[in-house]
Amino acid sequence: MALMPGVTRRLIPRNFTRGGQTAVHGVLLHIMEGTLDGTDSWFRNPDSQASSHFGVGRDGRVFQWVDTDDRSWHASGANSTWLSIEHEGRGGDSLPPPQLAATARVIRWMHETEGVKLQLADTPAERGIGWHGMGGSGWGSHPDCPGNPIKRQRPAIIAAARGTTEETDMELTDAVKLPAWGPASWPKDVGLQDGKISVNTALGSTYGHAQRSAENSAQLVRDVQDLRAAVADRGAGRARASGLMTTPEPSGSVAVELAQLRGELGAGLAEIKGSLGVLVERTARTDADLKQLRADTEGSARGLQHEIDELKRARWPLAQIGSLLAVGALIVSVVALFTSN
Ligand SMILES: [Zn+2]
């Protein structure tokens, strides 16, 4: 089963062959000669005997009508080996920027999910991004589907598909919203004292590592957002240009930037992993240190108690002191007796 996430699922109950997609040579672009909603209705009609895997509106809305495991009925002899995208509009139209961008997203997904090659196909023997009319009579004789302007936009579509980043529901900023965890300051790290690490030092060190990891994450997200903004600016400029130009502008710079972005992301994640590794190690160390500290303290306390007991018993024998005092008093009495006479 292959359903594209993030698009409107409008699976139709008929007019397709379940499990009939025996191969994927690429995707054929079509023009609806009508609207997205009208086509949605027509594909549900038993009389139409027609369908498409996807439909893209001029406003960028995307409908998925048929699972890509199933064969849509869009180009006669090509049905079992080519996927399909219908476009809202009339023959001779070009795709406005939202429609072009949406088509690029669908093609990007087909590339990742179905192995559609991001290259031009202009004959049935080729593989990649083709068009309905290229198959001639064997594909239903639709030489003007989808029309020259859209055919010429395919390089721009491919460039956009290469540059498309998958959007997720999660805002990047949400992932690293830093809570006010940990106190504003921490006792000075004094290192080992008498061969032992103090509790404050151990906790402070752990907290320090955790905070540094969080700061690294926040910085990484800011860098990624800057890069995404830069890539989006370029993409918007390219889409504007492609609407006006009859020949595609050279592609590649966006792809290069994305490759760099991926590289930086990889490096950033490796750094975070490293910091987390250190943090985990420090936490384990802290546990061991605390255990040792407790054992030492208990040992010392037991020793001290023992010494006190010894002192009580051996060095300050109250019975002997009592008898010594008694002897002392006797001597004093005797001396007093001799000196008084
Ligand atoms: Zn067509």
Image (spheres, rainbow, N blue to C red):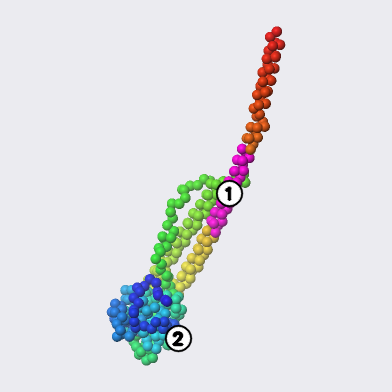
**Is residue 209 visible from the viewing direction of this image?**
yes
Mark 1 = which residue?
A: 291
Q: Nearer the viewer, residue 267 or 11?
A: 11
Span shown in magenta: 277-305
Measuring from the top left, give residue 30's x and y in whole percent: 35, 82
- Secondary element at tag 1: helix
Q: Which residue is drawn at 67% across and 23% down?
A: 323
Cβ of mark 2 under 8 A from ligand 1: no
Q: Nearer the viewer, residue 8 or 206?
A: 8
Q: Which of 9 and 251 is in front in this view?
A: 9
Q: Which numbered mark, 1 or 2, is in the foreground of this view?
A: 1
Mark 1 and mark 2 lie on one chain; the one further toward the N terminus is 2
Q: Residue at x 51, y 52 (%)?
A: 207
- Secondary element at tag 2: loop
Q: How many marks?
A: 2
Mark 2 = which residue?
A: 126
Q: Residue at x 42, y 62 (%)?
A: 172
Q: State the separation of the CA atoms marked 1 and 2.
A: 69 Å
Q: Which quadrant of the structure image shows residue 97?
A: bottom left
Q: What residue type is labelled 1?
A: Lys
